Amino acid sequence: MQDISMHILDIAGNSIDAGATRIAVTVEEDAEGDTLRVTIEDDGKGMDADTVRRLTDPFFSTKRKKTGLGIPLLAQSAREAGGCIRVRSAPGGGTTVEAEFRLSHIDRRPLGDLTSTLTALIGGNPEVDLLFRYRAGGGEYVLDTADVKRQLGDVPISYPGALSVLRKEISAGMRRLGKGGG
């Protein structure tokens, strides 16, 4: 994975495969603490403790393809940048994946194009509610597609015009906090 936004897309895809109807993605940049934290929480089917323990093994997968590179690659990216990964899950209780990176580490992958990542998730999975939080410099930008869907009424959130507006909104919201949203 070339950037962190691609990790987010992959892990959110796992959430969707696990039956999640709501996914929360939080990206926190803490310059003072020299930390970049990415958290993806879902309300999917969850996993037992043995499955969680085996997640960083690239030859283990809960899917039919028999290799699961998403979590191992995210864990590797975090370790390379002086960070770590934590996974919490319980059967029927959803899953939380948290990756932490040292923000200033020379080997930290770039954040990437979060705007395109989020727009792809929203447009490709209109039945899933996405809560996105971006925190930086003491400020916070929040987008909740459940609220957006209510405002849109009968217009599908995957409608190209709606996605275009969302793309601009996400980009502007992140830019207000000092990060270009792509």
Image (cartoon, grey):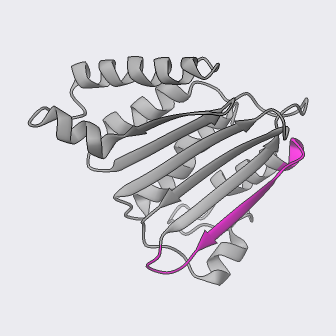
The residue lying at 19 percent from left, 35 percent from top is 151
* Residue 129 at x, y percent in the picture: 33, 49
- The answer to whether residue 38 is left or right of residue 16 is right
The N terminus sits in image quarter: top right
The residue lying at 42 percent from left, 59 percent from top is 17
- The answer to whether residue 145 is left or right of residue 178 is left
Q: Is residue 38 above or below residue 141?
A: below
* Residue 56 at x, y percent in the picture: 74, 63
Which region of the structure is painted magenta?
A: 79-93
On whether residue 158 falls in the magenta region, the answer is: no
Residue furthest toward the front? 138
The C terminus sits in image quarter: top right
* Residue 91 at x, y percent in the picture: 49, 81
Within the image, what quadrant is residue 119 found in? top left
The answer to whether residue 156 is seen in the rendering is no
Within the image, what quadrant is residue 16 found in? bottom left
Compare residues 63 and 181 and report the one nearer the observer.
181
Compare residues 141 and 56 and report the one nearer the observer.
141
Compare residues 106 and 65 and report the one nearer the observer.
106
* Residue 138 at x, y percent in the picture: 66, 33
Q: Is residue 86 above or below residue 150?
A: below
- The answer to whether residue 160 is left or right of residue 135 is left
The answer to whether residue 170 is seen in the rendering is yes
The residue lying at 21 percent from left, 27 percent from top is 159
Compare residues 102 and 13 and report the one nearer the observer.
102
Numbered-mark total: 0
